[in-house]
Amino acid sequence: MAYRKPWQKKDDGLTEEERIQQEVARTRLPKGREVIGYVEQLLGAKRMYVDCTDGRRRLCRVPGRARRAVYARQGDYVIVEPWEIQGDEKGDVIWKYKKHQVDYLRRKGKLEGI
């Protein structure tokens, strides 16, 4: 067996279709107070306006713990966690969906209200 460097991807023998099916099966859904949102406008400094499924438009930011994992752009679907105070106006973006995950959510009817 050949030596694999830590930054190289592990070849698990799956086709691209099988890999996408696994990701769809592991699609993260909102828990508790979290809502799904659509990034409407980027403002800079990791801030953006997000239209949420609960009918509100929030000024959201990407918190430091998620900065490297969540690189959101205009038109992306994300999970928003509303703040305890001013939760109707502000929130944190904690997850970004991939295209095939958005298709899955659309088929399941989870994107109603956006």
Image (cartoon, helix red, strand yellow):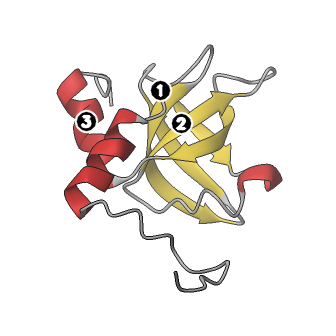
Name of the residue lying farthest toward the top: 32
Disc 3 + disc 2, Cβ < 8 Å:
no
Tag 1: residue type?
A: Leu
Q: Residue at x 48, y 33 (%)?
A: 28
Determine if residue 72 is in view.
yes
Residue 29: image tag:
1
Disc 1: CA contacts within 10 A as few (<14), some (14-19) or many (>=20): few
Q: Residue at x 27, y 44 (%)?
A: 21
The foreground one among 54 and 7 is: 7
Name of the residue lying farthest toward the front: 1
Q: Could you say whether the residue bearing mark 3 is in a helix, strand or loop?
A: helix
Q: Residue at x 59, y 82 (%)?
A: 4
Residue 79: image tag:
2
The foreground one among 100 and 39 is: 100
Tag 2: residue type?
A: Ile
Tag 3: residue type?
A: Tyr
First in sequence: mark 1 or mark 2?
1
Q: Position of residue 102 (x, y in %)?
A: 30, 42
